[in-house]
Image (cartoon, rainbow, N blue to C red):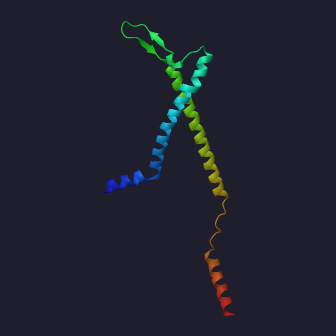
Amino acid sequence: MGLLKEFREFAVKGNVIDMAVGIVIGAAFTTIVQSLVKDIITPPIGYILGKVDFKDLSIKLPTDTEPVTINYGLFINATINFLIVAFAMFMVVKGVNRLRRQLEKKKEEAPKEPPKPTKDQELLSEIRDLLKNQT
Protein backbone atom coordinates (compact mmCIF):
# COMPACT_ATOMS: atom_id res chain seq x y z
CA MET A 1 0.00 0.00 0.00
CA GLY A 2 2.91 2.38 0.68
CA LEU A 3 4.21 2.09 -2.89
CA LEU A 4 0.82 3.06 -4.35
CA LYS A 5 0.62 6.08 -2.03
CA GLU A 6 4.15 7.19 -3.00
CA PHE A 7 3.32 6.84 -6.70
CA ARG A 8 0.12 8.88 -6.30
CA GLU A 9 2.05 11.65 -4.52
CA PHE A 10 4.67 11.60 -7.27
CA ALA A 11 2.13 11.67 -10.11
CA VAL A 12 0.03 14.44 -8.61
CA LYS A 13 2.93 16.73 -7.77
CA GLY A 14 3.03 19.93 -9.80
CA ASN A 15 6.42 19.18 -11.33
CA VAL A 16 5.26 15.96 -13.01
CA ILE A 17 2.14 17.60 -14.40
CA ASP A 18 4.15 20.61 -15.58
CA MET A 19 6.62 18.29 -17.27
CA ALA A 20 3.81 16.40 -19.05
CA VAL A 21 2.29 19.65 -20.30
CA GLY A 22 5.74 20.76 -21.47
CA ILE A 23 6.24 17.55 -23.44
CA VAL A 24 2.87 17.89 -25.19
CA ILE A 25 3.49 21.55 -26.03
CA GLY A 26 7.02 20.67 -27.16
CA ALA A 27 5.69 18.04 -29.56
CA ALA A 28 3.20 20.53 -31.01
CA PHE A 29 5.94 23.16 -31.25
CA THR A 30 8.16 20.70 -33.12
CA THR A 31 5.45 20.23 -35.75
CA ILE A 32 5.19 23.99 -36.19
CA VAL A 33 8.96 24.37 -36.50
CA GLN A 34 9.18 21.55 -39.04
CA SER A 35 6.51 23.23 -41.14
CA LEU A 36 8.26 26.59 -40.79
CA VAL A 37 11.52 25.11 -42.06
CA LYS A 38 10.01 22.90 -44.77
CA ASP A 39 7.34 25.27 -46.08
CA ILE A 40 8.68 28.78 -45.42
CA ILE A 41 12.45 28.93 -44.83
CA THR A 42 13.98 26.37 -47.19
CA PRO A 43 11.92 27.16 -50.34
CA PRO A 44 13.32 30.72 -50.70
CA ILE A 45 16.84 29.47 -49.92
CA GLY A 46 16.41 26.74 -52.54
CA TYR A 47 15.08 29.30 -55.01
CA ILE A 48 18.09 31.54 -54.45
CA LEU A 49 20.39 28.55 -54.96
CA GLY A 50 18.85 27.76 -58.34
CA LYS A 51 15.43 26.24 -57.61
CA VAL A 52 16.85 23.46 -55.47
CA ASP A 53 14.56 21.51 -53.13
CA PHE A 54 16.62 20.55 -50.09
CA LYS A 55 14.77 17.30 -49.52
CA ASP A 56 15.91 16.15 -52.96
CA LEU A 57 19.60 16.91 -52.35
CA SER A 58 21.50 13.65 -52.11
CA ILE A 59 24.57 11.82 -53.28
CA LYS A 60 23.95 8.53 -55.05
CA LEU A 61 26.51 5.86 -54.31
CA PRO A 62 27.22 3.40 -57.10
CA THR A 63 26.07 -0.11 -56.24
CA ASP A 64 25.06 -3.21 -58.17
CA THR A 65 21.83 -3.62 -56.23
CA GLU A 66 19.39 -1.04 -54.91
CA PRO A 67 20.58 2.58 -55.05
CA VAL A 68 22.17 3.92 -51.86
CA THR A 69 21.94 7.66 -51.21
CA ILE A 70 23.35 10.09 -48.71
CA ASN A 71 20.46 12.52 -48.16
CA TYR A 72 22.34 15.62 -47.06
CA GLY A 73 19.36 17.85 -47.96
CA LEU A 74 17.27 16.22 -45.25
CA PHE A 75 20.21 16.75 -42.89
CA ILE A 76 20.21 20.46 -43.78
CA ASN A 77 16.47 20.64 -42.98
CA ALA A 78 17.01 18.82 -39.67
CA THR A 79 19.87 21.20 -38.80
CA ILE A 80 17.69 24.25 -39.48
CA ASN A 81 14.92 22.67 -37.37
CA PHE A 82 17.36 22.15 -34.51
CA LEU A 83 18.68 25.71 -34.68
CA ILE A 84 15.19 27.19 -34.58
CA VAL A 85 14.10 24.98 -31.68
CA ALA A 86 17.35 25.65 -29.80
CA PHE A 87 16.96 29.41 -30.29
CA ALA A 88 13.31 29.29 -29.17
CA MET A 89 14.24 27.30 -26.06
CA PHE A 90 17.09 29.72 -25.37
CA MET A 91 14.62 32.61 -25.48
CA VAL A 92 12.21 30.79 -23.15
CA VAL A 93 14.96 29.98 -20.64
CA LYS A 94 16.27 33.53 -20.87
CA GLY A 95 12.78 34.88 -20.10
CA VAL A 96 12.30 32.49 -17.18
CA ASN A 97 15.71 33.42 -15.77
CA ARG A 98 14.86 37.13 -16.04
CA LEU A 99 11.57 36.59 -14.19
CA ARG A 100 13.35 34.53 -11.53
CA ARG A 101 15.92 37.31 -10.99
CA GLN A 102 13.14 39.89 -10.71
CA LEU A 103 11.32 37.78 -8.10
CA GLU A 104 14.54 37.29 -6.11
CA LYS A 105 15.20 41.04 -6.27
CA LYS A 106 11.69 41.79 -5.00
CA LYS A 107 12.19 39.32 -2.14
CA GLU A 108 15.44 41.06 -1.20
CA GLU A 109 13.79 44.48 -1.37
CA ALA A 110 10.76 43.40 0.67
CA PRO A 111 10.73 44.87 4.16
CA LYS A 112 12.04 42.45 6.71
CA GLU A 113 10.30 41.79 10.00
CA PRO A 114 11.62 43.87 12.84
CA PRO A 115 13.81 41.87 15.18
CA LYS A 116 12.05 40.28 18.14
CA PRO A 117 12.73 41.92 21.47
CA THR A 118 15.33 40.35 23.71
CA LYS A 119 14.41 38.85 27.08
CA ASP A 120 15.62 42.01 28.82
CA GLN A 121 13.46 44.19 26.57
CA GLU A 122 10.42 41.98 27.22
CA LEU A 123 10.97 42.23 31.00
CA LEU A 124 11.36 46.00 30.83
CA SER A 125 8.14 46.27 28.77
CA GLU A 126 6.27 44.18 31.33
CA ILE A 127 7.60 46.35 34.18
CA ARG A 128 6.58 49.50 32.30
CA ASP A 129 3.08 48.13 31.70
CA LEU A 130 2.71 47.15 35.39
CA LEU A 131 3.80 50.60 36.50
CA LYS A 132 1.29 52.25 34.13
CA ASN A 133 -1.51 50.10 35.51
CA GLN A 134 -0.67 51.02 39.16
CA THR A 135 -1.19 54.73 38.69
Between 9 and 20, the residue placed more toward the observer is 20
Give coordinates of residue 95: x percent, y percent: 61, 43
Left or right of 131 in this view: 72 = left
If the image is split into quadrants, where does the N terminus sit? bottom left
Up the image or down, 57 lies above or below 35; here it is: above
Residue at 47% across, 49% down: 15
User: Which quarter of the figure has residue 85?
Assistant: top right
Residue toward you, 40 or 20: 40
- Residue 68: horizontal and vertical position, in percent? 41, 13
For the point 47% across and 17% down, which residue is it?
A: 71
Foreground residue, 10 or 132?
A: 10
Q: Residue furthest bottom?
A: 135
- Percent x, y of residue 93: 58, 41
What x and y, as percent, mark residue 64? 37, 6
- In the depicted view, which residue is nearer to us: 84 or 130? 84
Residue at the location (62% across, 48% down)? 99
Q: Using the image, determine if residue 115 lies above or below residue 84.
A: below
